[in-house]
Amino acid sequence: MTVVRLAARLSEDWHADAVAADRAGFDFVLADDDPDRAARPEPLTLLAALAGATRDVGLVAAVSTDFTEPYEVARQLASLDHLSGGRAGWLARWDLFRPGDFRRGTAAQGGAERAARFVGAAWTLLDAWHGDEVVADRARGVHVTRPDVGAFRHRDADFDITGQFNVPRSPQGRPVLFVPAGAGPHVTPLADVVLGDRPHPLAFAPLRVDLAAAGGPAAVAARLVERVAAGECAGFVLDPHGGCGVAEFAAQVVPLLPERARSPHGTLRARLGLPPLPFTALHTGR
């Protein structure tokens, strides 16, 4: 049986989109940070709010590696993973804003190489907790196992940071890492998921469709199955802007796709079929 994975970009009606995707069994929703679209909330803040309105769907935020810092991003992603019960994902982007949008100039535009080092620094921070440090023993007045919990040291060509990371290890250890197709040799090997129709075990191709113009829901469902069966991608990210919305797609197309077993209340890693990351694996690579 051909399994068609589904995801959706959030439109301006983000709450309705997220709830519809959650109920229809989508793997994740994506909150992008498009500077050309007005009146859009910051992705991580939006997804933190949606964590309480959804149960199973993954929550993926586009976060720039050019205009943020690893400590800030790692802390926000770990917090989202805690709030959502292990459903956080990170779309690493280094092309979200133009240099003139901020006062950091072109020096901040390190491209994919800097993005890879940024991800490495963030992983160092997230790996600073083993997962067993919080004991919360009120009788002894002990909260954590040792005073230096969360200690880290990271140094590379872009980042030289040391200190203590103050968010305990989250359910996934690290968020699922997404990168855009064509990210290049520096970032793509780090990715769990690729957004685009490129060769990758978990590639999600973009999908914008007008059901009437495409021959109706049955024709659309059949075409999606054909593309996955042909190995073009593992699934699709529905873009509701200018085409079929998430609720309409969920109601008319999803029932026509082959059903697949889903583990309820699991992490995003488990939902995507990725192996868990126990602490011992975090320091030995993927």
Image (cartoon, grey):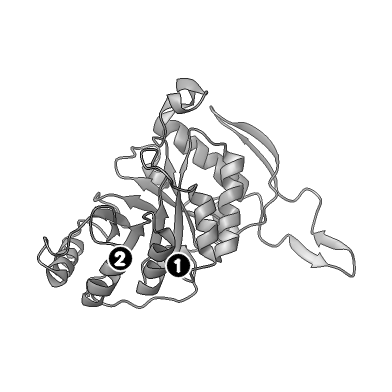
- Please, what secondary structure does the residue beneath circle 2 have? strand
Q: Upstream in the sequence, badge 2 or badge 1?
A: 2
Q: Nearer the viewer, residue 80 or 18?
A: 18
What residue is shown at x 35% (from left), y 78% (from top)? Answer: 261
Q: Amino acid at mark 1?
A: Ala
For the residues labelled 2 and 1, the Cα–Cα distance comes to 14 Å
- Please, what secondary structure does the residue beneath circle 1 have? helix
Residue 9's x, y, as percent? 35, 55
Residue 106 placement: quadrant: top left
Q: Nearer the viewer, residue 173 or 73?
A: 73
Q: Residues within 10 Å of mark 2 (few under 14, many from 20)?
A: many
Residue 248 placement: quadrant: bottom left
Answer above or below: position of 102 versus 182: above
Q: Amino acid at mark 2?
A: Arg
Residue 3's x, y, as percent? 26, 70
Q: Nearer the viewer, residue 247 or 136?
A: 247
What residue is shown at x 38% (from left), y 42% (from top)? Answer: 34
Residue labelled with disc 2: 5
Would you say the residues marked 2 and 1 are in contact, meaning their CB atoms lie under 8 Å apart?
A: no
What residue is shown at x 81% (from left), y 50% (from top)? Answer: 147
Residue 125's x, y, as percent? 62, 45
Q: Which mark is residue 77?
A: none
Residue furthest right in the image = 140
Residue 136's x, y, as percent? 79, 65
Residue labelled with disc 1: 270
